[in-house]
Image (cartoon, rainbow, N blue to C red):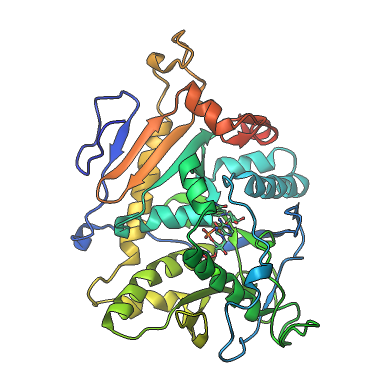
Amino acid sequence: AGRLSNNDSFDSSALTAHNVPYPSINNPQAVKPVPFQQPTGLLTFSYTPQRVLEFTNSALRYYIDPPPGADLRYGYERWIKRPEERTRLDGLLRAVERVMQKADSSAGRGSGVKWLRDIAVVTWRGIMTKILTAPYEERDRCEFNVMYVDRTLYIEEHLSEARLAEKEDLPPKQRVQTYYGYSFESWCTSSRPGVPERIEGHPVGWGGDVDTNVQWCSVIKTKLGDNRLVIGGEVDCVRGRFDGRTDTFVELKTSMAIRNAGDEARFEKKLLKFYMQSFLLGVPEVVVGFRTPAGRLTTTQTFKTIQIPRLVRGKPGAWDPQICFSWGHHFLNTLKSIVSAPAEASEGGDGSGTPREPSKRVWRVVLAPGDGVRVSLLDDEGIRDVEAGEDRVGILPRWYYDQVAG
Ligand code: 0WD
Ligand code: CA
């Protein structure tokens, strides 16, 4: 792979590689506003402790104020930690299949596939967050695999073996900090609305030992500019009740207590991620638990998602969500134009010069802070690596591909 550049729009060193420049975050006047539609819930699902996906709300939790001074280290030894693995789109695709089946049964056969054809992007929320916040990301580079099937982009995260091993093998200090976040979720949630959990052998208010297999996920549809998106993501809990809409969703976060101006600036930077992550799923409220370095909860503060941008406006290091939406829109449209171009004869990965069918091509997208974006076509070896010996067509499970490849 050649060097990344902010300015080059095309890298001649590889016919199939494209560079996409970031917008200038220093020149917001040049940014054309792109509207982001209020998300609508399509369906929800749960992962059980056995990591089985079911279309129930078994993993749904209710918000409850945490006990003052709660110990976020509580239960650390009993944490059931889901092993790090490549996050495939499979769970989300089962949800998409279900939405299509519903369309078929209410509006007639073929309605599902027709609905999907109008969807520009199917992906996890975490991936959209990374794409949209890229103009402000100064450190972490990220990689995605992309397919374009029947006018829809599918985007999954690509984690190298090295990155996976790194995530699995976090230094103890970082591992504990990660746990503080999950523990806060336990202290802040209950199996019944408004009633603190009482579990034999545990302090009142402890929601149960942390098991990161268990997740409640919501799938929504929304629109960024003229691109319809279907996005799935984890929702920590709801306030009061759940009636199929997103307006009672609550996102829970922990952060170090703010002691000085430096801490405050760091927190305001983090708010962009909190904001974008929540906004994308239509989560209207973020509850932040501030803690000591040793994991003692000091205070909690509730943020209304849509008001978060106002809190940083005009401050040093401020961010502007409009830059993110405008960039995201530009990114998706450019990506679409790259991946929908007819295959070149030179792309024949088997050496015979026969190009891979467009809908079976897999693209690698690299977002590199300071450098920009690089899009390139994977060769057959790259695709084999992505398929990982499973019954897949590129990143998609075959059972799904066969239904949607038109
Ligand atoms: O295993 C992995 N490497 C990942 C798994 C990375 C990113 C996502 N996922 C999975 C999630 O577990 C979920 O099933 O994809 C699905 C969709 O997740 P999402 O909502 O798109 O993920 P994101 O927005 O990145 O993270 C939401 C929450 C996190 O909450 P905080 O407050 O920390 O942002 O998902 C959890 C975490 O609670 N989460 C994970 N849990 C266990 N292992 C992981 C992980 N690696 N990543 C995120
Ligand atoms: Ca959370």
Q: Quadrant of the N terminus?
A: top left
Rendered position, 114 above or below 47:
above
The answer to whether residue 241 shows anywhere in this view is: yes
Q: Position of residue 271 (x, y in %)?
A: 39, 72
Residue drawn at x 24%, y 25% is 12
Q: Quadrant of residue 10?
A: top left
Farthest-out residue, right: 200
Rendered position, 400 above or below 181:
above
The answer to whether residue 359 shows anywhere in this view is: no
Please indicate whether residue 367 sits to the left or right of residue 96 in the image. left
Farthest-out residue, top: 352
Q: Quadrant of the C terminus?
A: top right
Name the one closer to the observer, 108 or 399: 399
Q: Position of residue 70 (x, y in %)?
A: 59, 86
Name the one closer to the observer, 139 or 16: 139
Quadrant of the image where one finds ligand 2: bottom right
Residue drawn at x 68%, y 64% is 211
Rendered position, 132 above or below 13:
below
Residue drawn at x 36%, y 49% is 141
Q: Position of residue 89 (x, y in %)?
A: 60, 45
Q: How many marks?
A: 0
Q: Position of residue 257 (x, y in %)?
A: 41, 83
Farthest-out residue, bottom: 68
Residue drawn at x 43%, y 31% is 340
Rendered position, 259 above or below 182:
below
